[in-house]
Amino acid sequence: MGFIIATDSTCDLTKEMLREMNVLSLDMMYFVNDVGYGKDDANAIEFHEFYDAMRNGARTSTSMINEETAESFLTELTAQGNDVLYLSFAGALSGTYENFKRVARKLDQTSDRKVFVVDSKCASGGEGLFVTLVAQKRDSGATFEQTCAYAEEIRDRVIHYFVVDDLKYLARGGRLSKGSAFFGNMLNIKPVLHVDEIGRLVPIKKVIGRKKSLKALVDKMEERYNKESDVVYITHGDCYDDAKYVADEVTAKFGMPVKIIPLSYVIGSHSGPGTVALFFTGDSRTEK
């Protein structure tokens, strides 16, 4: 008997990365013009095709992992004799966390195995970095209980910064008024956003122009990076060259390689093509 670390596809780690980390992942669904897909469906839309569809006006949406799916997933793992540490997408952004918590409470009454569910308060590559750090803790020889405690501790030191290219996607998701999006796009305003200590995506700064917004990501890392981990991730919504620019700037400034990862369709459905996000460790999520 051992313990399993599992998460959901909003962590944006590739299948190969998850396999190398020995972490399981459960798909969240995304929809394009009302047709549903999972991350690993055989008929899943190709990356560029998905973001081009958004550029051309396709309707995109997502759905959380429901309680029935969570129960089936966790029951199978515990029946195999495993304790399970589930690292969930931010509860402030999805009902997935609450569904897993309800199932964990049920299993506590019926199974002799332990299930511990952690609200990562993270999204995208921030959730991916969080999962990476927790897997490293397990691999260092930590027990189940020690790894669970570490997960609750480290999540508040995983820093997220996002920039988007078109504000209409944030407006469509209710994170910005339509009027603000219209005038912001007209004036070429590019907000810098972060995921706060509660797990909400909030704007913290406005800059003019795409290149300045990308540079602002690196500037924020220079302010906040604490060198606790040299793992740095960047995700991008079909704008690899922009992600590469940020990665090169980070490497030049801090001397470490950066892993560039495609932004998942679930996250990208709400932030849109042209999203670039940077993730690293800092002392706190709280903006000064």
Image: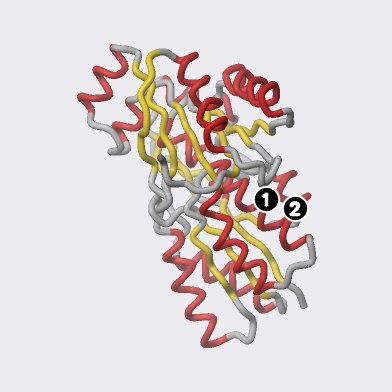
**Image position of 228 with respect to 117: above or below:** above
Per the rendering, the mark at residue 173 is: none
- Answer whether labels 2 and 1 touch (C-beta < 8 Å): yes
Q: CA distance from mark 2 to mark 1?
A: 7 Å
Residue drawn at 52 percent across, 87 percent down? 109
Whether residue 179 is visible, yes or no, is yes
* Quarter of the image that includes the N terminus: bottom right
Q: Nearer the viewer, residue 198 or 222?
A: 222
Give the residue number, with chain letter if any, for mark 1.
132
Whether residue 237 is visible, yes or no, is no
The colour scheme applied to this rendered structure is secondary structure
* Location of residue 76 (image quadrant): bottom right
Q: Nearer the viewer, residue 85 or 284?
A: 284
| Horizontal arrangement in the rendering, residue 280 relative to residue 208 (left or right) | right
| Horizontal arrangement in the rendering, residue 112 relative to residue 269 (left or right) | right
Horizontal and vertical percent position of residue 168: 32, 26
**Image position of 256 with respect to 124: above or below:** above
> Mark 1 packing: few (<14 Cα in 10 Å), some, or many (20+)?
many
Residue drawn at 59 percent across, 70 percent down? 74
The amino acid pointed to by label 2 is: Met
Horizontal and vertical percent position of residue 288: 40, 40
Give the residue number, with chain letter if any, for mark 2.
21
Q: Secondary structure at mark 2?
A: helix
Q: Nearer the viewer, residue 99 or 29?
A: 99
Residue drawn at 28 percent across, 24 percent down? 181
> Mark 2 packing: few (<14 Cα in 10 Å), some, or many (20+)?
some
| Horizontal arrangement in the rendering, residue 166 relative to residue 247 (left or right) | left
